[in-house]
Image (cartoon, rainbow, N blue to C red):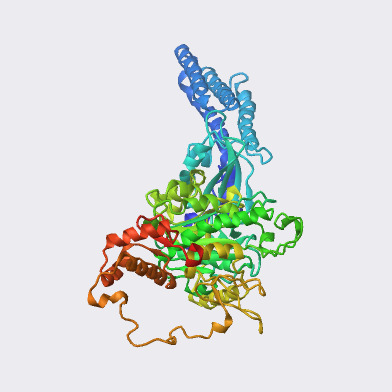
Amino acid sequence: MARNSRSVAYGHDEAAAYLADPYATGSGGGVGVYLLNRVKPHLPPWLGWAGTGLAGALGSLRWEASAGAGVGLTLASVALTGATWWAGKSTSQQRRLHSAITVAAGSAWVTAACLAGPTTGPLDDLFLMGGPVVALSWNVRMVLRRNDADPQGSGDKGLLEKVGLARAQIGQAKVEPNRVTAPLALEPGEQTNDDVSKALARIASALDLPISAVRYHPSPDSSRRGELVIVPEDMLAQPAEYEGPSNLGGSIAQPLVIGRYDDGSPLVIWLPGDPEAKRNSTHVLIAGGTGSGKGETALNLMTEILSRRDVLLWVSDPKAFQDFAPLRPGMDWSAEGGADTEVMVEAVKAVIPARTRWLGAHGYRQWVPAAAEAQTDPAHSCQTGRACGCAGMPFLVPWFEEAANTLRNLGDDAFTGIAQEARSAGVSLIVSLQRPSYDQMSTSTRASLPSVIALGCDPRDEGFSLPEAVIDAGAHPGAWGNRRPGYCYVVSPGIPEDRYPSPGRTFAFPARAVPLMEQLAAWALREGASADPVTAGAVTAVAGRAYTGRTPAPAAGSPRLTAVQGDTTMNDEQGQGYGLLIDPEDAGIDPDTELPGDQEGDDAPIFGQETGRKPSPDEARELFALALEEFERAGQMVVGPVDFMDWCDRNNLSRSWVSKRLKEAALEGRLEPTNATGRWRIVPALAAA
């Protein structure tokens, strides 16, 4: 990244030197310049000594033996000493006293030299011996103040003085590659960590760095101590390209690598919890404006999820999987928005209690990798005390891309119940949208999404994405906008809190990464987890044909049942392949072939509608039941009056009649209300029966 000469001058070594030595003026071109830079901070006391002698010599030429001058000079000396004492009230007591004594001694010598002559009596000896002693005392004070062994060393001048923190004290700076960390102690009772947070922009200006390069990590044990962190060089300027999954075939409980931080360390996130590490399971909000790299960020996280052996991924994308088409075959369930997304939301709600019931029955307080394996451990066997052999339960990730579309259709609290209840069920919700403002997403939902990947946004929207404490520590995604795609801050359990304000960048996905994504999807289809009987049963009871599930290919010669409408029998021989199944003998039947007995004219309207006769109430109810079956066969599991308009026209029925029939069907258990007014979810025929 091109940088101006001033920025280049502040490499990490220079930044460390600036923090440790506020008087240093930079590097030079030789030994002489270096020595001059080192000597210059110590010259002022000696210049003051020389000036005092010159003033005494010149004053004696005019005021020697003058009584009036003696009175005036004495009063001036007292006034100057008093002014020095008054001006030093904002400094330390030692500095105040040292300054007053120095001014008093110097002004007294000048008064005596002006009245009696600088060489009279002991005045010349006092000047030659006492002056250097006073000057050296100030030099010693300066050296002690910058002693690296003193963590409370004063930073009265230089950087902190420029930014309004003159009384703060900088300790020994720790220099790492492209990172300088200095402990900071503020004035007791006068300054707090909030003062440093407000000064970060001025510190960045003083160092001629972008605001994102300066952060402050307040101590959790003190309101006036913390660490000032400076990262002089932007190592994220050149994007790193995606090279494949970080842990193919590993567990979803292991970290997911989605990019790198600005110091080169990996940018990771965890979804399941870990009771041993005291880390909670989490839901994730991905937020960023148009052009901020939200799509590539999603690809990073999605590819990592699909590369793990014990997880199911459900994805809703109203943009018809424009960005994720190569990965779609590896997903357990995909929906393109609209009614299909409504069904997915309802299905997630339905699987939560079913999964928590199974986990509780097997002794799991939360999902762990052992829950995804066959239950052969008596400690996790239906509380029977012996191995039950139950199939394991994979982790589940429902992902709602462009969620603002779903929230508009289903209401701003569509995900609230899921977000509040799903974590204990081994379910991690991921919601992606451009602007997580309160007029799009309810505050309850936002509060239940503890993790966030915050990409570039409008500066006014920073508070919608990141916690206030992280913003105060120096995180500012609004400084990027859409000018730096992929730049992000990640706040999530398992990440050290001092990492929260550190920017990272997700891997880039060039066109040549498409074959790699296709191979990953094929691997997930072949090697990835299949839905367990509990999850599959719960989702098919809600979604019917809308859910088919990811079914790995069977071994050669093994009998296998094939997905089709209506039968939810499980293949016991394989122990997997759960979903909607039929006997393999029927798998070769062409569904478009006419069945025996089909005759020309069979497609004519039933009940004689061709004559214009309106069906009787019983006939109309039968027609309505057939219409629901037709929607179910087509996989459209959410309906409303608008979906029956053509059907009403064909059968001479009004929309109000359909609304009444929808309510009757709900009472009979054939329909369930959804979050959207006037929309109903079809209960699959077998579940309703």
Q: Residue at x 37, y 68 (%)?
A: 622
Which of the 4 image quarters holds residue 610? bottom left
Relative to 548, residue 95 above or below: above
Q: Is residue 389 left or right of residue 528?
A: right
Where is residue 253 drawn, in percent x and y? 64, 59
Q: How many marks?
A: 0
Relative to 648, residue 199 above or below: above
Which of the 4 image quarters holds residue 570? bottom right
Where is residue 609 drawn, in percent x and y? 27, 75
Q: Residue at x 69, y 60 (%)?
A: 370
Q: Nearer the viewer, residue 273 or 626?
A: 626
Q: Nearer the viewer, residue 141 or 537?
A: 537
Q: Nearer the viewer, residue 524 or 372?
A: 372
Q: Residue at x 40, y 70 (%)?
A: 631
Where is residue 163 drawn, in percent x and y? 48, 40
- The reply to whether residue 13 is in sight is no
Where is residue 239 drawn, in percent x and y? 51, 66
- The reply to whether residue 546 is in sight is yes
